[in-house]
């Protein structure tokens, strides 16, 4: 199979156009992780498409952000920085971030607590690099 045939296969399987495949090029996450999450959480009720893969990528990213927050709270508590830990307890990535999946127009942005997240932007950078999209 040559590259053009592979692209044709992908656009047909993912229900998208040639240029839309660029949305996947940005993602550094292992696609087997994305597909596994999709299959485990959507099952047969939703066909895998470009938009559903992009949405799963964001769901995994938001979960990783919440894990980061939990770990950071524990770290701050150990260092007896209770004020900073308390500030982080107000965060919930699923509430604070908004995502939009529409082929190459896909993006993520902060709708709440931007000032708090910006304090940890450098530490969150690897999560967003893996995601391929960043609100910063």
Image (spheres, grey):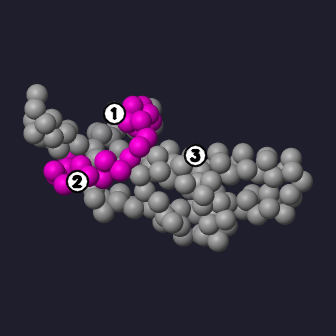
Q: Residues within 10 Å of mark 3 (few under 14, many from 20)?
A: some
Q: Is residue 45 above or below residue 86?
A: above
Check disc 2 and report the residue beneath it.
Answer: 20
Q: Which mark is residue 29?
A: none
Precedes in sequence: disc 3 or disc 2? 2
Q: Is residue 130 left or right of residue 85?
A: left
Check disc 1 and report the residue beneath it.
Answer: 44
* Residue that protrudes farthest toward the front in the picture: 122
Q: Is residue 114 above or below residue 16?
A: below
Q: Is residue 2 above or below residue 98?
A: above
Q: CA distance from mark 1 to mark 2?
A: 24 Å
- Element under disc 2: helix
Precedes in sequence: disc 1 or disc 2? 2
Q: Position of residue 57 (x, y in %)?
A: 43, 46
Q: Residue at x 15, y 40 (%)?
A: 7
Q: Is residue 108 above or below residue 2?
A: below
Precedes in sequence: disc 3 or disc 1? 1
Residue 90 found in image quarter: bottom right
Q: Residue at x 65, y 48 (%)?
A: 68
Q: Position of residue 106 (x, y in %)?
A: 35, 60
Q: Is residue 79 left or right of residue 3?
A: right
32 inside magenta stretch? yes
Q: Which mark is residue 64?
A: 3
Q: Is residue 32 left or right of residue 14?
A: right
Q: Is residue 33 visible?
A: yes
Q: Is residue 56 visible?
A: no
What's drawn in magenta, residue-wise? 15-38
Q: Residue at x 27, y 56 (%)?
A: 103
Q: Position of residue 109 (x, y in %)?
A: 48, 66
């Amino acid at each position: 199979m040559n590259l053009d045939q592979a692209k044709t296969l992908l656009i047909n399987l993912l229900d998208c156009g040639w240029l839309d495949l660029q949305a996947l090029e940005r993602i550094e996450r292992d696609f087997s992780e994305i597909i596994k999450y999709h299959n485990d959480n959507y099952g047969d009720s939703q066909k895998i498409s470009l938009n559903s893969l992009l949405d799963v990528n964001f769901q995994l990213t938001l979960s990783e952000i919440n894990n980061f927050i939990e770990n950071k709270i524990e770290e701050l508590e150990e260092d007896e920085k209770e004020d900073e830990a308390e500030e982080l307890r107000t965060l919930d990535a699923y509430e604070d971030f908004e995502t939009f999946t529409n082929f190459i127009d896909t993006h993520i942005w902060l709708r709440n607590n931007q000032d708090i997240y910006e304090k940890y932007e450098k530490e969150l950078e690897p999560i967003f690099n893996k995601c391929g999209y960043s609100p910063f």
